[in-house]
Image: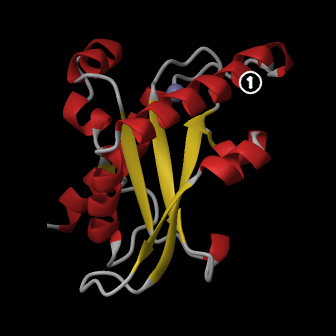
């Protein structure tokens, strides 16, 4: 499942509409600015309706991902129907810390911060709008893509399988 930064396709709008939060005097996070960069799925024909968030800071830029959050805005029913029975709809909806992508000791605090942002309906609407805009660029460019037909959730399940197996072996 290729996840592409929204800002890569919409640099100006992305710069303007990427949420960031400035934190001061919290026990659980260093002071300063945290940006919530959006990634969307680049798989033609896919309808996964989710966003992946990389939390970055101006000081560390792309060199350090402070947390990776996955979130879907549709109902649990949507993810249940969309994925069939194999995936856990609660996990697909999230928000949750993506176990296959970079995390830090601050990840849970940043997940809480993201949950706080989601309490604003404006933010959820913005994510949906960005998803639709991004998906339009994917479907418009579809004829340019070579025939890569793998389903992104299948892909994800395969990726999720590996660490679990490893964990089981280590016990
Ligand atoms: Zn997808």
The answer to which quarter of the image holds residue 167 is bottom left
Q: Residue at x 28, y 12 (%)?
A: 81
Residue found 45% across the figure and 26% down from its top: 49
Q: Position of residue 89 (x, y in %)?
A: 23, 28
Q: Quadrant of the N terminus?
A: top right
Residue 156 x %, y %: 43, 37
Report the residue marked by disc 1: 137
On screen, residue 44 versus residue 79, left or right, reads right
> Is residue 102 shown to the viewer in this render?
yes
Residue with the most extreme left position: 171
> Could you say whether the residue bearing mark 1 is in a helix, strand or loop?
helix
Q: Residue at x 76, y 39 (%)?
A: 9
- Relative side of 167 to 60, left or right: left
Which residue is at 39% across, 53% downward?
69
Identify which residue, 59 or 153, lies in the foreground: 59
The correct choice, above or below, for 53 with respect to 144 in the image is: below
x and y percent of residue 19 in the render?
A: 52, 55
- Tell me: residue 48, above or below residue 115: above
Question: In the rendered view of the protein, which quadrant contains the C terminus?
Answer: bottom left
| Residue nearest the observer in this picture, 137 or 17 | 17
């Amino acid at each position: 499942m290729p996840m592409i930064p929204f800002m890569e396709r919409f640099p100006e709008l992305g710069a303007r509409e990427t949420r960031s939060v400035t934190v001061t005097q919290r026990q659980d996070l260093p002071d300063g600015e945290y940006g919530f960069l959006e990634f969307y799925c680049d798989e033609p024909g896919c309808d996964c309706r989710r966003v992946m968030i990389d939390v970055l800071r101006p000081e560390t830029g792309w060199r350090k991902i402070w947390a990776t959050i996955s979130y879907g805005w549709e109902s649990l029913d949507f993810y249940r129907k969309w994925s069939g029975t194999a995936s856990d709809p609660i996990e697909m909806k999230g928000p949750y810390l993506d176990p296959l992508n970079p995390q830090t000791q601050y990840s849970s605090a940043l997940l809480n911060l993201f949950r706080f942002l989601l309490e604003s309906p404006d933010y959820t609407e913005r994510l949906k709008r960005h998803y639709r805009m991004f998906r339009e660029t994917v479907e418009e460019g579809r004829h340019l893509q070579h025939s890569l037909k793998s389903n992104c959730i299948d892909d994800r399940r395969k990726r999720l399988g590996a660490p679990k197996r490893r964990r089981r072996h280590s016990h």
